[in-house]
Image: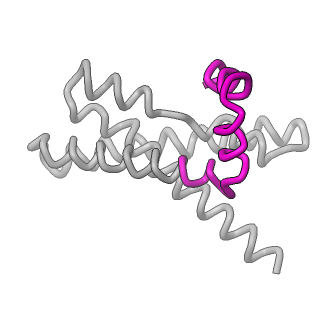
């Protein structure tokens, strides 16, 4: 991404200007990536034929890992008077690569672990943003 950005900046100034003019482009790209991750995870679940208990176990493992990492990040961040950044730094992961690796080289069902982590982290982040907004009113 960095090299692509430098090439666009150097050799494609019109494209750069268009990108800079599009309001909230990063948000829409993130939403598209999240939709693809969710679709891939659902596809893996539907095609797996695994039992409900197996699916719930994998999803719960993703939830536990997510909560533990957010909590540890908040504890560590608290020592530096920045709980929010600590929680985000340790809890928020880019697991698209892990999902791709699991789906491509392991059983497709194994992509449910990192896929559920993505869903849990986004639910936790949404809840935190909602709570912050409610408290600030």
> Which percent across, then down, holds residue 132?
75, 67
The quadrant holding residue 87 is top right
- Identity of the residue drawn at 71% across and 33% down: 13
> Which percent across, then down, holds residue 11?
68, 23
- Residue 22 part of the magenta segment: yes
- The answer to whether 114 appears left or right of 23 in the picture is left
> Which percent across, then down, holds residue 117?
45, 43
40 or 93, which is in the foreground?
Answer: 40
- Identity of the residue drawn at 47% across and 33% down: 95
- Residue 71 part of the magenta segment: no
**What span is colored magenta in the figure?**
1-29
- The answer to whether 67 appears left or right of 11 in the picture is left
Q: Is residue 129 above or below residue 38?
A: below
Q: Is residue 9 above or below residue 18?
A: above
- Identity of the residue drawn at 21% across and 41% down: 44
Mark count? 0
> Which percent across, then down, holds residue 28?
55, 54
Question: Which SS type dominates the magenta stretch?
Answer: helix
Q: Residue furthest right?
A: 81
């Amino acid at each position: 991404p960095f090299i692509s950005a430098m090439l666009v900046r150097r050799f494609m100034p019109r494209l750069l200007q268009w990108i800079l003019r599009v309001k909230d482009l990063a948000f829409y790209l993130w939403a598209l990536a999240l939709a693809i991750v969710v679709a891939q995870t659902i596809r893996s679940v539907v095609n797996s034929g695994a039992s409900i208990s197996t699916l719930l176990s994998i999803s719960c493992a993703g939830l536990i890992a997510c909560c533990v990492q957010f909590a540890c990040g908040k504890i560590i961040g608290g020592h530096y008077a920045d709980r929010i950044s600590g929680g985000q730094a340790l809890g928020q992961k880019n697991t698209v690569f892990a999902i791709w690796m699991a789906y491509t080289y392991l059983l497709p069902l194994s992509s449910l672990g990192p896929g559920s982590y993505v869903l849990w982290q986004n639910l936790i982040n949404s809840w935190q943003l909602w709570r912050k907004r409610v408290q600030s009113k």
